[in-house]
Amino acid sequence: MSAPFEGEGGEPNTFGGYLVFIGAIAGGLFIKTENPKLKSLLPILILSIVLPLLFTRSRSSYLALIPACLVLGLLLRHRIIIISLMAVALLLSPLFLPSTVKDRILFTFTQEEASDQVQIGGIRLDTSTSARILGLERLLLDFPKHPVLGYGITGYEFIDAQYPKVLIETGVFGLIAFFYLLYSIFKMAINHMKAVKTPYFKGLAIGFIAGYIGLLFHAIGANTFIIVRIMEPFWFFAGIIAVLPALERRSVTRPQENGSKIRRFASVN
């Protein structure tokens, strides 16, 4: 499962990251919103996200989905019950997951033997995973040649993993700056989630945090934070989260202003 306008091969991996993030936003809103109409429509949206996500066959997206769901559970009031139910669902998932999903996960260890596969402790990995490991080995060997500022953007061979890519292209300084940016986003989201009281705003912040954590794991096997498909909605929602407290103050102030205008109008008449 992929999306239009991706060329002949498609990019299900990045499509999966997008679906995880948007699904987490929808999940956070469903948990907290008190609007009955929205509450009834969000499960339809979530279901329409989960099914394509499963059939992307993207292992990075499957990996991202687990922490995203766990964070949603941890940020709920009855977190122990929710996390327990999630753990049971994860253990029982082989019983109800589509065969194509199970085959894709098992393919990591059951692919037919090939010359360019990597073996770890007697376990033979598929060619895709092996290529990432071999690329990481080459990166570690080349990194000492330009450790401070790196090789420059696109100055090194293609690396399909965000963190090694940042390290080799921008060096230690770039990696520190990147991690500081990630930390700043997380800190801002947590602070604003605690600050707002409106259920809709609270749900939006919870969903953003869950989706963000999911993307951090997705970035292990993809260039998540430089992919337009994922980063456009991500930074759009990050901007909304940044102004949530101001939006809430404005929503509280306006009814008070309207009420005072009505009282003044009534007194004049």
Image (cartoon, grey):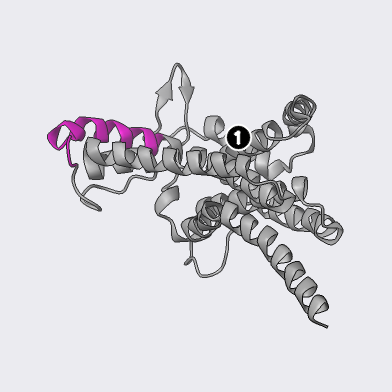
Q: Is residue 254 above or below residue 182?
A: below
Residue 131 inside the magenta-drawn segment: yes
Left or right: 168, with 108 as reference point? left
Q: Which residues are magenta?
A: 130-149
For the N terminus, the quadrant is: bottom right
Seen at 72% across and 53% down, the residue is: 200
Q: Position of residue 219 (x, y in %)?
A: 45, 42
Foreground residue among 171 and 14: 171
Residue found 57% across the figure and 64% down from its top: 3
Judge from the rendering whether residue 167 lies leftward or rightward of residue 230; answer left or right: left
Task: Give the x, y percent position of residue 208.
Answer: 59, 47
| Horizontal and vertical percent position of residue 149 | 18, 41
User: Which residue is situated farthest in the bottom direction here?
Assistant: 269
Residue at image point 63% right, 61% down? 250
Q: 260 or 96, which lies in front?
A: 260
The residue drawn where x is 69% and y is 46% is 197
User: Residue 116: which quarter of the image?
Assistant: top left
Residue type at mark 1: give it.
Answer: Pro
Identify the element where label 1 is drawn: helix
Dominant secondary-structure state across the stretch colored magenta: helix
Coordinates of residue 225 in the picture (x, y in percent) = 42, 50
* 133 and 244: which is toward the camera: 244
Q: Is residue 134 visible?
A: yes
Q: Is residue 50 left or right of residue 214?
A: right
* Residue to which mark 1 is pinned: 67
Q: Quadrant of the C terminus?
A: bottom right
Residue 177 magenta-drawn? no
Q: Is residue 269 above or below residue 165?
A: below
Query: Does residue 177 sit above or below 16 in this rendering?
Result: above
- Furthest-left residue in this view: 145
